[in-house]
């Protein structure tokens, strides 16, 4: 899909790596100038990305490409398949829950020491014990270490001491500390986030080194961004320290692609039907619904900001077959649809015949499905209808189940309180190559309208191309101790103002956000930040007020770059 080549300025490229296909778009001045779709090689994601990039550059030139945004499955695949390298988790849990509550990793070690909720040391670490544990980790052949202490986001002295001992004894070992990765409360989630970061950082940085060198050689001077799980972008350089923020970037690209194509402030379910999976997300009055508890990875909640999405193993390439006299649809994918050269009949083949789509070799679709129909003793038309019904019913069931989970999210509850009625769904928005065949039937079954766009097949890549940077900062101020700490990890300092109030905490949080934005090369959008958390508490000792505690959260929320007003 290519438009006539002509002079344009500030071209943008978005590339989304899916489980089956990798899509790319070249976008400028409200138009998709070119789009590309290549099969994804899971064993060579870098090569797949670069082949898509090269084709886009061949069509549009390199001179005016201002920004390239990549959505990649590298970290997701490492964690989902268990291919991340063996990693040790060193915990300083202090008092409270039993150690059994924290067995996140099979290589978990517990250390003495304790910090309280205000950052005061309750129990000092045992340096001899720390060194013994580090030697044990090394002797086990482990070269990656995650260190997490309870309340280290208030005082990370114990984490830094353990890190120093690791680096001193074994400089070749990789070590991450939880406060540097995710400086927020909730010790188990912070520990999990740190653990997954340590597990994937080396592979991610190898990928980043390689992809950066390749892009610089092709498009010198362009900005290279990575799409995160929250639908925003960050610079490739900033992602090196926090690779886990890129997990689930595929579903994030789905959600951003949905909003890029449908700019109305409606309540909608987004259904991205790919070759292998379908991603389902919720849009409330034009804004995506967040997972308030963070991304769920491997059964553990994390401190990674992410949309509330569900991926199900059902797509256009899901195999259609018979087993013990029963029709089966998926979840396996053994290749492309028969009409596109595959060896097995698929969901796409069934819809190809049922809806007269004329995709590829329709005779191949017919031949492969007739064989299945014959073994089941049914007609070809009836088989195609049963496949369609099964696909639509499964999507509808998952959407209904998701509504049960979405109802617990704060934004969903707020909508019902404000409108004084149950949540009302307006439409189903379809994206992905198979969406035009399936989504109209799904919407009719649910009883709402559907929305499709001519760029629905490459919406994920478009969403990545025009997504703006996101950043959230949370600051905790303790006026009694005259200190502040915050997330992202490493934010800390002193407060000198004696009559410190909530408005001062807001100003401090904004200044911290601006500082982090500058460090990460994301300063253009810092002025659009808004406060999403404000709390204050008095600290009383005896009958005297000792000080106040303030917590303020401020963020640049998901959205689009300034120049994006929609697509022609």
Image: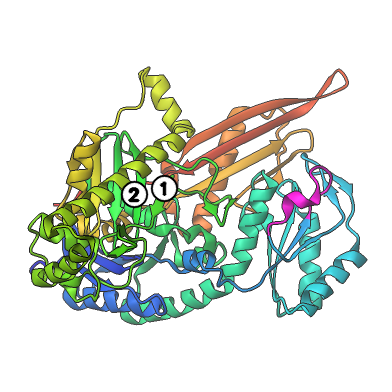
Specify the segment rendered in magenta.
Answer: 92-104
Confirm whether the magenta stretch covers residue 309.
no
- Which secondary structure, mark 1? strand
Give the CA distance from mark 2 to mark 1: 9 Å
Residue shown at the point (10%, 54%) measured from the top left: 355
Q: Residue at x 18, y 45 (%)?
A: 441
Q: Indicate which disc residue 390 carries.
A: none
Contact between labelled residues 1 and 2, with CB atoms less than 8 Å apart: yes
Magenta segment includes 102 = yes
In the figure, 63 relative to 482: above or below? below
Quadrant of the rendering where the N terminus is positioned? bottom left
* Residue 127 placement: quadrant: bottom right
Of the pair 334 and 366, the residue shown nearer to us: 366
Q: State the residue position of label 1.
A: 309
- The answer to which of 492 and 148 lies nearer the viewer is 148
Residue at label 2? 255
Spot occupied by residue 361 in the image (x, y as percentages of width and height): 10, 72
Label 1 neighbourhood size at 10 Å, few (<14), some (14-19), many (20+)? Answer: many
């Amino acid at each position: 899909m290519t438009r006539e080549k002509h002079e344009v300025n500030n071209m943008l490229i978005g590339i989304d790596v899916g489980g089956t296909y990798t899509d790319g778009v070249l976008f400028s001045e409200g138009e998709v100038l070119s789009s590309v779709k290549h099969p994804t090689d899971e064993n060579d994601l870098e090569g797949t990305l670069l082949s898509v990039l090269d084709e886009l550059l061949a069509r549009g030139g390199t001179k005016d490409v201002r920004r390239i945004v990549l959505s990649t499955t590298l970290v997701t695949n490492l964690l989902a398949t268990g291919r991340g390298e063996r990693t040790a988790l060193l915990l300083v849990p202090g008092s409270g829950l039993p150690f059994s509550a924290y067995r996140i990793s099979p290589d978990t070690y517990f250390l003495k020491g304790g910090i309280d909720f205000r950052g005061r040391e309750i129990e000092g670490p045992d340096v001899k014990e720390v060194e013994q544990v580090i030697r044990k980790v090394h002797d086990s052949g482990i070269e990656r270490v995650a260190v997490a202490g309870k309340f280290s986001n208030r005082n990370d002295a114990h984490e830094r001491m353990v890190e120093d001992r690791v680096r001193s004894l074994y400089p070749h070992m990789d070590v991450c500390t939880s406060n540097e990765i995710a400086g927020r409360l909730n010790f188990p989630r912070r520990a999990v986030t740190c653990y997954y970061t340590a597990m994937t950082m080396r592979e991610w940085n190898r990928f980043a080194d390689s992809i950066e060198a390749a892009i610089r050689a092709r498009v010198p001077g362009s900005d290279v961004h990575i799409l995160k799980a929250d639908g925003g972008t960050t610079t490739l350089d900033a992602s090196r320290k926090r690779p886990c923020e890129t997990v689930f970037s595929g579903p994030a690209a789905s959600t951003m692609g949905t909003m890029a194509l449908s700019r109305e402030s409606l309540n909608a379910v987004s259904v991205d039907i790919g070759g292998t999976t379908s991603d389902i997300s919720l849009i409330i009055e034009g804004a995506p619904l967040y997972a308030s508890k963070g991304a769920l990875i491997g059964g553990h909640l994390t401190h990674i900001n992410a949309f509330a999405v569900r991926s199900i193993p059902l797509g256009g390439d899901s195999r259609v077959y018979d087993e013990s006299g029963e029709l089966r649809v998926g979840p396996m994918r053994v290749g492309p649809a028969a009409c596109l050269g595959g060896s097995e009949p698929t969901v796409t083949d069934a819809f190809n015949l049922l809806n007269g789509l004329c995709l590829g070799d329709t005779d191949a679709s017919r031949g492969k499905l007739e064989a299945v129909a014959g073994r089941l003793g049914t007609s070809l038309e009836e088989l195609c209808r049963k496949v369609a019904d099964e696909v639509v019913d499964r999507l509808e069931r998952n959407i209904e189940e998701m509504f049960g989970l979405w109802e617990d999210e704060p934004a969903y509850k707020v909508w019902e309180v404000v409108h004084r009625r149950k949540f009302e769904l307006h439409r189903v928005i379809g994206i992905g190559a198979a969406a035009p065949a399936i989504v109209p039937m799904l919407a009719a079954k649910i009883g709402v309208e559907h929305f499709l766009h001519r760029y629905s097949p490459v919406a994920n890549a478009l969403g990545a191309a025009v997504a703006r940077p996101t950043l959230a900062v949370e600051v905790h101020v303790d006026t009694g101790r005259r200190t502040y700490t915050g997330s992202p990890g490493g934010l800390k300092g002193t407060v000198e103002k004696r009559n410190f109030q909530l408005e001062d905490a807001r100003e401090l949080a904004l200044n911290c956000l601006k500082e982090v934005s500058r460090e990460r090369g994301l300063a253009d959008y810092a002025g659009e930040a808004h406060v999403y958390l404000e709390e204050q508490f008095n600290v009383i000792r005896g009958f005297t007020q000792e000080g106040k505690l303030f917590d303020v959260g401020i963020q640049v929320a998901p959205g689009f770059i300034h120049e994006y007003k929609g697509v022609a």
